[in-house]
Amino acid sequence: MRLAQLFRRQHYRSDVTDFIDQLKADDPQMEARQRAGRALLWDQSVDRGFQAEASAARVAQKPYVYQTGDQDSDAVKR
């Protein structure tokens, strides 16, 4: 007997699964709208040239971004 079969509940359905199935049954077009939204935002080709330019133009960040060079001398005097 496999371990996965030992803990398997054949007729169990979670409340979340029931909710999602009911939501899809109430609005059959919802999944198509979700796929269209995903394609709009995420499923796009990557422009490698622009990505290389952006990486080359990146400016190194200082270790502590809120402290400027002018404040170093003021902190010592106080």
Image (tube, rainbow, N blue to C red):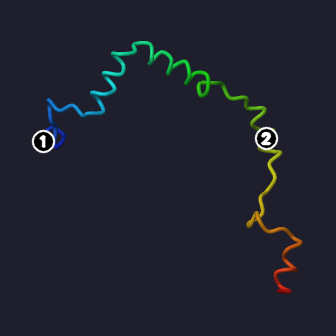
Horizontal and vertical percent for residue 75? 82, 81
Q: In the image, is 5 to the left or to the right of 32? A: left
**Which residue, as the protein is rendered here, is positioned at the far top?**
29
Cα distance between the residues tagged 2 and 1 = 53 Å
Asked if residue 72 is positioned above or below residue 32 in the image, the reply reads below
Tag 1: amino acid: Leu
Left or right, 7 with reference to 75: left
The residue that mark 1 highlights is: 6
Q: Please provide percent x and percent y for residue 76.
A: 83, 85
Q: Characterize the local packing of mark 1: few (<14), some (14-19) or many (20 or more) Cα atoms within 10 angstroms.
A: few
Asked if 46 appears above or below 74 in the picture, the reply is above
Report the disc number at residue 52. none
Residue 73, located in which quarter of the rendered image? bottom right
Residue at image position (16%, 43%) is 3
Q: Tell me what residue is drawn at x 85 percent, y 74 percent.
A: 71
Q: Quadrant of the C terminus?
A: bottom right
Hey, which quadrant is residue 4 in on the image? top left
Q: Depth check: 53 or 75 in front?
A: 75
Residue type beneath disc 2: Ala
- Which residue is tagged 2? 54
Q: Residue furthest bottom?
A: 77
Q: Quadrant of the N terminus?
A: top left
